[in-house]
Amino acid sequence: MLAIKNVHETVGGEVGALFEGGDVQLDELEREEILDILQTSGYILFRSSDVDMPRFTAMVERVSSRISLDPARNFHSNVAQKVDAGTDPVGLHCENGNSPFWPDLAWFYCERAATSGSQTTVCDGEQVWAALGDTAREMFTRHDIVYSRRVSEQQWKDYVYHSREGKLPRADITLDHLRALMNDTSTATIDPLDGGAICYRFRTPAARTGRFSGRVAFANSILGPSYNYEVPVITLDSGEPIPAEIMAEITQVTGVLTSEVTWKNGDLLLIDNTRVMHGRRAIVDTRRTIYNALSYV
């Protein structure tokens, strides 16, 4: 039996699981064992000296059925992209959670930890949903949220190119190839703009049933960043903005329920991207080097 610890103790019980030291070698972990842990834990931190880029890549590929990506980042392996979002704090969000290309899992590998600050933040959407007041919960039960955003031709074609493992020449990529990658065509539209750019409109619940836990979690990108992209327009499905008092409540509740992951060299963090939002404190040590991968099960 593998030794598992809670990473953080916060309101509501277990949030994360920790494999530490000699608990386990990454190569020994079975896919179903990892996914079973995510049924109860929103994220898993593997703290072991045997983690490196080849093992990180191999683990992502072993657990995942399909790799996703951020087209604005550079690749450093078949799956890994360097996290490069400036030095300012990054708000809580789900990776690609403001788009119809929302992956199940978000992976992070720390090659070089910061000497101070620069922590990754995590916030369990199940706890947030339980802590929100009746007015907010009723509003988000009645209304989905809608993200609208312009994306450049190079960015959306890069997304298709890498999603198809480079097997389709960029010159042959069309909007039909992009639409084929959407998680659910009934919740999103993609329209062409001048110059080859597109505008997508994506409708999704603010609180949704987690992919692994089966419980409702307030997991979205309402508070999230727009580094490398145009800022999306975020509204309720009625077209109205989210009321300022509700946004203030979300900020207050998530602030109380947010924990920090203080990185060590060789750490591997796996997040249930359908339940747990994450962000980042301000970068203090710019030598910090972390890689990210996104995937579906």
Image (cartoon, grey):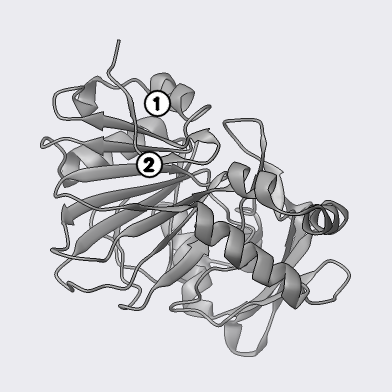
Q: Residue at x 16, y 54 (%)?
A: 111
Which label number is shown at residue 34? 1
Q: Is residue 140 left or right of residue 18?
A: right
The foreground one among 195 and 98 is 98
- Residue 271: quadrant of the picture: top left
Q: Name the quadrant of the N terminus.
A: top left
Point 54% across, 66% down: residue:
173
Q: Is 194 drawn above or below residue 149 in the view shown?
A: below
Three-letter code for the amino acid on which mark 1 is drawn: Ile
As drawn, 195 above or below 267: below
Q: Residue furthest bottom?
A: 194
Horizontally, is 275 left or right of 6 in the view?
right
The mark that comes first in sequence, 2 or 1, is 1
Q: Residue at x 43, y 63 (%)?
A: 70
- Give coordinates of residue 50: x percent, y percent: 11, 35
Q: How many numbered marks, from 0 up?
A: 2
Name which residue lies at 84% across and 76% down.
Answer: 240
Question: Can residue 200 be seen in this snapshot?
Answer: no
| Left or right relative to 24: residue 68 | right
**Which amino acid is tagged 2?**
Leu
Q: Could you say which quadrant of the image residue 136 lies in?
A: bottom right
Crowdedness of circle 2 by 10 Å Cα count: few (<14), some, many (20+)?
many
Q: Are marks 2 and 1 in contact (CB under 8 Å)?
A: yes
Tell me the element at label 1. Answer: helix
In the rendered image, residue 6, in percent from the top left (x then y), is placed at 36, 31
Give the quarter of the image for residue 8.
top left
The residue pinned by badge 2 equals 270
Instruction: Residue 22: give x, y in percent of width and height.
Output: 14, 24
